[in-house]
Image: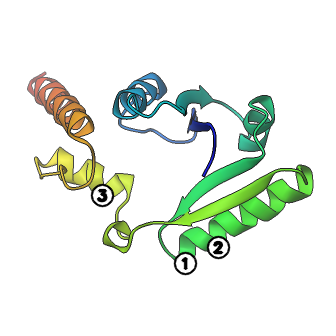
């Protein structure tokens, strides 16, 4: 679809993800290392400003359901108003994964569920390590 794809990882201060921005960037770099035209970078602020900095002509976003579409449509229209030369391409997920979210995967991993159907093995291993460390920390905190 594109000659070069920049995967943009937002450093969003209003959310508390399981992995830091650097950890997410590193995981994405690892799982895309065999795709030569993919670059993974983090950013802060507005996606359209990052896209402008990257000299992008399109933003690619994924949608799972109608609620995603409504949200993404609003952003695409707002972005178009501010940056008329920047298009948004919405890609519909495979139906097998339409119910899936990072929250679902995180919850499964937290309780030692099998996430291998939903994420690459490398990411599944990182989830297992991270949740084990968090559980260990919680146990130590409870003992103190």
Question: Between tags 1 and 3, which lies in front?
Answer: 1
Q: Which residue is label 1 attached to?
A: 66
Element carrying mark 3? helix
Q: Which residue is label 3 attached to?
A: 104
Camera-nearest residue between 116 and 105: 116
Give me the disc on residue 70: 2
Q: Quadrant of residue 133?
A: top left
Q: What is the distance, in whole Å, between disc 1 and disc 3 at their CAs?
A: 18 Å
Position in image of residue 140 (x %, y %): 12, 23
Q: Residue at x 82, y 59 (%)?
A: 78
Element carrying mark 1? helix
Give me the disc on residue 99: none
Q: What is the distance, in whole Å, between disc 2 and disc 3 at their CAs?
A: 21 Å
Q: In the rendered view of the protein, which quadrant contains the C terminus?
A: top left
Above or below 108: residue 99: below
- How many circles with numbers are drawn on the protein? 3
Q: Quadrant of residue 56?
A: top right
Q: Quadrant of residue 33?
A: top left
Image coloring type: rainbow
The crowding category of the residue bearing disc 2, from other C-alpha atoms within 10 Å (few below 14, some 14 to 19, many at least 20), is: few
Position in image of residue 61 (x %, y %): 59, 56
Q: Residue at x 34, y 63 (%)?
A: 100
Above or below 26: residue 117: below
Camera-nearest residue between 137 and 93: 93
Q: What is the distance, in whole Å, between disc 2 and disc 1 at their CAs?
A: 6 Å
């Amino acid at each position: 679809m594109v000659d070069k794809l920049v995967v943009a990882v937002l450093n969003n201060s209003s959310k508390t993800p399981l992995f830091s921005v650097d950890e997410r960037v590193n995981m994405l770099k690892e799982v895309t290392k065999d795709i030569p035209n993919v670059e993974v970078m983090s950013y802060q602020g507005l996606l359209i400003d990052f896209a402008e900095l990257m000299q992008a002509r399109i933003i690619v976003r994924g949608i799972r359901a109608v609620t995603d579409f409504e949200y993404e449509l609003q952003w695409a229209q707002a972005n178009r108003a501010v940056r008329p030369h920047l298009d948004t391409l919405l890609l519909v997920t495979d139906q097998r994964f339409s119910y899936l979210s990072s929250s679902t995967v995180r919850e499964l991993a937290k309780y030692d569920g099998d996430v291998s159907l939903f994420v690459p093995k490398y990411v599944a291993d990182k989830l297992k390590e991270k949740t084990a460390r968090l559980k260990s920390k919680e146990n130590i905190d409870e003992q103190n």
